[in-house]
Amino acid sequence: MIHYHVPSVSNSLKLERTCPHCSRPNGRIHSAITQRHISDPKIETVTQRRMMCPFCKITWTVRLQGVSDGRQRTDRLICIGVVLYMLGLSYRGVEQFLTMFGWQGSKSTIERDLARSGQKAKALHIQSLRMGVKVLGVDGTGARMAGQSRAGMLFFVDIGNGKLLFAVRANETDSRQVRRHVQEIAAMVGAEQLRTDELSVYEGASEGIERTICLAHWLKSKCRRSWELARQFAAEGLLYESQTMLELKRLLHEKWSSPQLPEEIERLVRRFINCHRGIHGKANQLLQHIERTWPYIGRGPGDPTNNVTERLIGLTYKIRSKTMRGFKSWDKALAHPYLSQYLRGENGVSDLRRVI
């Protein structure tokens, strides 16, 4: 359970005598206390007072804590709109919810509130980052942007505590861009190990640190490919080769925990080593890839897969992006995962007052 600290509106007006223009003290009272209408779930009016600097003659308004300058809504109401959107409502849905109770909050206003809170959450997240990440999980996903071509994002996750580290704009097809981000972030957080999927783009990015391949990705793709080859061999009447591919599938499920390539699979590699064409050549490519990547499969204690990274991508980004036509800007798209991570709290507490 997460305990949320939400903004509130103070009961008493605290006079701020420091001039916001020249920063000199001893500001003077310039008006009587007045009441102003405010949109809030609990109160209808708030008190405020005008102050004047005796030196530069600038006047300013002192408001209750919980009411920001120039706003017709309290921070508490803004917090409600932000949380409702993060729980799954659309901008228009949040607007309809607020207006149903007579509170202010247009679709565009809610969007601006989310953008501002997301940037604050991102800044707080980066400030709180700690060194000494043992296993750095990296995975990419497609980013749908409104009115723009589909692009990509890379997510960096601390596998040990299951928390987001960074979300950056990068396509997994751009090897130079991916390797630059991976090397910079791995050095920044002091990662000891890199956990990725099978894409070759990550091979050159793991210089200086150990790289492990996600067991779930590796096993699923190899078993599926073995099954496909078995069906193709059977369709051409090559029953012996078909049974060999089925045997390979069985061995992968049984022997994946072995740190060394099992002798049974090694014999299959030698059997197809000289095949370079047709289905036999495809079987040779599969076996060669299994032999080459076998030492790098994640087999350590705990979660040997990259599922923590994929789960965080889904929870912090993909679930939200699937319910909308796309983020309108990259700043909003990249800030959203940090705000989503912030709402999950730290040690069971999430202080929303810091991001509203």
Image (cartoon, grey):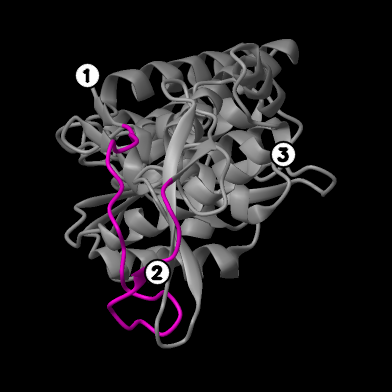
SS at mark 1 in the image: loop
By secondary structure, the bulk of the magenta-drawn segment is best described as loop
Residue holding disc 3: 108
Q: Residue at x 44, y 19 (%)?
A: 249
Q: Nearer the viewer, residue 341 or 92?
A: 92
- Secondary structure type for disc 2: helix
Q: Nearer the viewer, mark 1 or mark 2?
A: 1
Give the crowd class for mark 1: few <14, some 14-19, many >=20 residues within 10 Å: few
Q: Is residue 122 left or right of residue 27?
A: right
Please provide percent x and percent y for residue 106. 70, 32
Please provide percent x and percent y for residue 117.
Answer: 48, 46
Residues at discs 1 and 3 in contact (Cβ within 8 Å): no
Q: For the residue marked with disc 1, what is the amino acid?
A: Met
State the separation of the CA atoms marked 2 and 3.
39 Å
Identify the magenta region. Answer: 6-33
- Whether residues under marks 2 and 3 lie with C-beta atoms below 8 angstroms apart, the answer is no
Q: Earlier in the sequence, mark 1 or mark 2?
A: 1
Q: Position of residue 46 (x, y in %)?
A: 44, 37
Q: Residue 1, labelled with which disc?
A: 1
First of labels 2, 3 by sequence position: 3
Q: How many numbered marks appear?
A: 3
Residue at horizontal 82 percent and vertical 49 percent from the top: 148
- Relative horizontal placement of residue 176, taking residue 328 as reference (left or right): left
Of marks 1 and 3, which one's residue comes earlier in the chain? 1
- Three-letter amino acid code at the position of disc 3: Ser
Q: What quarter of the picture does the N terminus occupy?
A: top left
Tag shown at residue 183: 2
